[in-house]
Image (cartoon, helix red, strand yellow):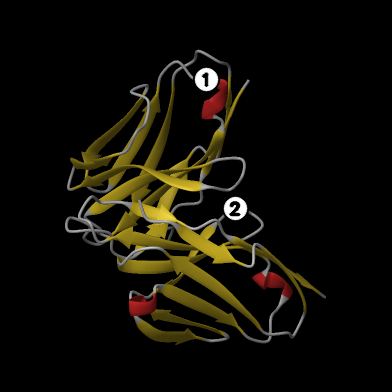
Amino acid sequence: DTAVSQTPKYLVTQMGNDKSIKCEQNLGHDTMYWYKQDSKKFLKIMFSYNNKELIINETVPNRFSPKSPDKAHLNLHINSLELGDSAVYFCASSQYGTGGFDEQFFGPGTRLTVL
Amino acid sequence: GIQVEQSPPDLILQEGANSTLRCNFSDSVNNLQWFHQNPWGQLINLFYIPSGTKQNGRLSATTVATERYSLLYISSSQTTDSGVYFCAVEETSGTYKYIFGTGTRLKVLA
C-alpha cells in the first residue's frame, strides 16, 4: 500500500517537449506539494494545494502548471522543457497544511532528464 | 529569509559508532522535520519535532526552538543509515516558507 505514489519514476525527453508527472496519495490528506531537487541535492518547494486550491506558488516559471482534479491527486505539467528543468521532482502530502506546514510524507520521486 | 545550516556536511563512520547531526536556523520557526534520503533517492520521514525530544529506535531528535537548533542522534549506526539527512523548517512569518537545510551526507562503513 503505497502512501504517496508518482508516475513515471524516470522521464527522459527532448528540449521543447511537454510532459506531465502524476501524483496520488491514499492517506486522506488535505494538502499536496511539489518539490524540486537539483543536482546538488538542494530541495525547494514549488507548489502547494489544499483541497484542490492553490496555496503556495513559489517563483517558478509559468511553464510549470500544477493541476489538482481532487484532493488525492496533484499533477505537474511542464511545457517547453529546458535543460535546466532536469532534476528530481518529489510529490508530498500532509494532513492539514492550511495554516502552515505540518508533517509531510514524500513520494518516491520522478527523475526528469531533458536532452 | 530564514537560513538553515546543517553540520557536518559530510560524515564517515564505522558501523556501530554513534553520531550527532545538527540543524541551525536563523529565525524562529513553526515546525521542524528531519528526513533521511537513502542512496536510492527515497525521502523518509524521521521526525516531526517543532520542540522537545522524540525517540524512534536507534534514532532520537531534540529541538530547542528558543535557541534555534535541532539535533539528530544516531546510535549504533548501520550501513543502512547511509545517505543524506535533511532538516526542514517553516518560517513563522506566515508567508508559507518551508526551507530545507543543506544536508549532512553520512556514510557508514562495514
Q: Quadrant of residue B28?
A: bottom left
Q: CA distance from mark 2 to mark 1?
A: 23 Å
- Does residue B17 appear anywhere in the picture? yes
- Res B41 label: 2
- Can you give x and y, in whole percent of width and height, for residue A82 in the image? 52, 20
Q: Quadrant of residue A40?
A: top right
Q: Quadrant of residue B59?
A: bottom right
Q: Disc 1 marks which amino acid?
A: Glu
Q: Say above or below: A20 vs B15.
A: above
Q: Residue at x 40, y 79 (%)?
A: B63
Q: Residue at x 35, y 76 (%)?
A: B65
Q: Residue at x 27, y 48 (%)?
A: A72
In the rendered image, the residue lying farthest to the top is A16
**Does dot 2 land on a helix, a strand or a loop?**
loop
Q: On the image, numbered disc 1 is attached to which residue?
A: A82
- Can you give x and y, in whole percent of width and height, for residue A54 in the image? 20, 40
Q: Say above or below: A52 vs B9.
A: above
**Which quadrant is home to the C terminus of chain A?**
top right
